[in-house]
Image (spheres, rainbow, N blue to C red):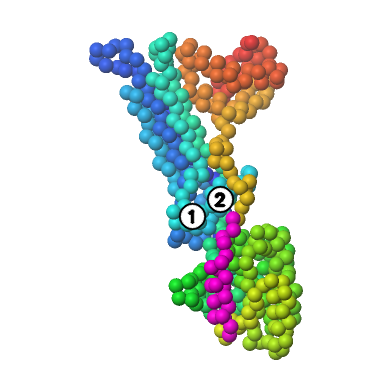
Amino acid sequence: MFVDQAEIAIKAGKGGNGAVSFRREKYVPDGGPDGGTGGKGGNVVVKVDMGMRTLMDFRYKSLYKAEAGENGQKKKMSGKKGEDLVILLPPGTLIRDKETGKIIADLKGPEDEVVIARGGNGGKGNAEFKTSTRRAPSFSQQGFYGQERQVILELKMLADVGLVGFPNVGKSTILSKVTKAKPKIADYHFTTLFPNLGVVEVVRGKSFVLADIPGLIEGAHKGVGLGHDFLRHIERTKLILHVVDISGIEGRDPLEDFNSINEELKAYSEKLFGRHQIVAANKMDLLSDEGRFLDFKKQVEELGYECFGVSGATGEGVEALMKAVTTALEGVEELPLYDTSDWYDPENMAVDIQEVKYWIEDGVYCLEGMAVERLYFSTNFSDLESLRRFQNILLKKGVFEELVKMGIEDGDTVRIYDLEFEYYE
């Protein structure tokens, strides 16, 4: 089974917590703080594996987590950085953020490697909080959370030329004739359910990759039939080789089929419709009236397309067609697939850890969120100085202001996880 789309959850490593420690040496009974900083969490990295061809593996595993950083240690020793998680993907994989639809990475060549989720920084140890007035801080900082998100993986074929056309027009036969690919060929619709690739070299030293893409039907741009699966794979092709059945043995009109396919391409993407296109009128060996081909060729050429009569079954005209494709490719520039607005701004990829959620439960004012969670676990509630810091940070974050808006009064209870205290202005 060919899998060209998958959804996974990625989670970068959390930073290690800072340590609370004090020097304890034989001749230094009252040593200062020496708690080290936590290690940075591991990143989630995607990298091209040229040997991979599908996204099948991602059907069986949906969560990918990088390693957390180690906690800080005494003697101002920092924690070890968490190992990066490297996810291998086939060339041609596009990665989108599920929530926004923005593109995070576009993997094409063997050198492509992108960080798609950054690990959290380590928390500061108590040695970092020492000041001229705070000689022995008994608190440290919890490590920061790493980025996490749901992403959509989309595999788009990396082929120079895409064979398009209605089902059963002979695309697979042409591919098998000009390459060593062995696609399944039979006389029924939708034979090809996944792309087949082959390398063509009819001009010495000038080869190109040809892809036989699943058959297209009307309404494909709306997802009908193989629809989006088909169109996704021809987005990257530099040139479209449009195959039509010129024989008419199935009662179809080749010009209507040709126009219908182009309308689907245009409805899906103007850029895709604008690709250089060469037309192959296939099954010439079954044609009883050559005038049918000549009329079709004239009409297509009037629209600005080259047209060749071929027979995938006998090989008639196929070499001339492939030479024309080879020549055309030399003058085709690779067009950008996406507008810059489709991409994530790397500076805005961070997860917003400042968000605090508020609600009232049985008369108790409750709040939670990554920001207050970090503060909660970074506080030594048996130390007056640490408690004062806890209160000041809540004040700066606007927590008390928000509670007042909710109607809190003196003596009401506030709950942060398993910590409860009474509020007084």
Label 1: few (<14), some or many (≥20) within 10 Å? many
On residue 5, which mark appears? Answer: none
Residue 10 visible in rendering:
yes
Eyeballing the image, is 63 above or below 408?
below
Q: Quadrant of the C terminus?
A: top right
Residue 330 lies within the magenta run: yes
Identify the residue at horizontal 50%, vertical 56% (top origin).
Answer: 108
- Which image quadrant is residue 222 in? bottom right
**SS for dot 1:** strand
- Which image quadrant is residue 248 in? bottom right
Which comes before the other along the chain, label 1 or label 2?
1
On the image, the x and y values in percent for residue 261 come to 70, 68
Q: Kindly identify the amino acid type of the residue bearing the numbered disc 1.
A: Leu
Which residue occupies the extreme bottom position in the image? 288
On the image, the x and y values in percent for residue 355 come to 60, 29
Identify the residue at horizontal 62%, vertical 67% (top origin).
Answer: 276
Query: Bounds of the magenta span?
Result: 316-336
In the depicted view, which residue is nearer to us: 256 or 136? 256
Give the residue at mark 1. Answer: 89
In the depicted view, which residue is nearer to us: 273 or 197? 273
On the image, the x and y values in percent for residue 39 come to 40, 32
Q: Are marks 1 and 2 in contact (CB under 8 Å)?
A: yes
Residue 223 visible in rendering:
no
Give the dominant element type of the magenta stretch: helix, strand or loop: helix
Residue 407 lies within the magenta run: no
Give the residue at mark 2. Answer: 95
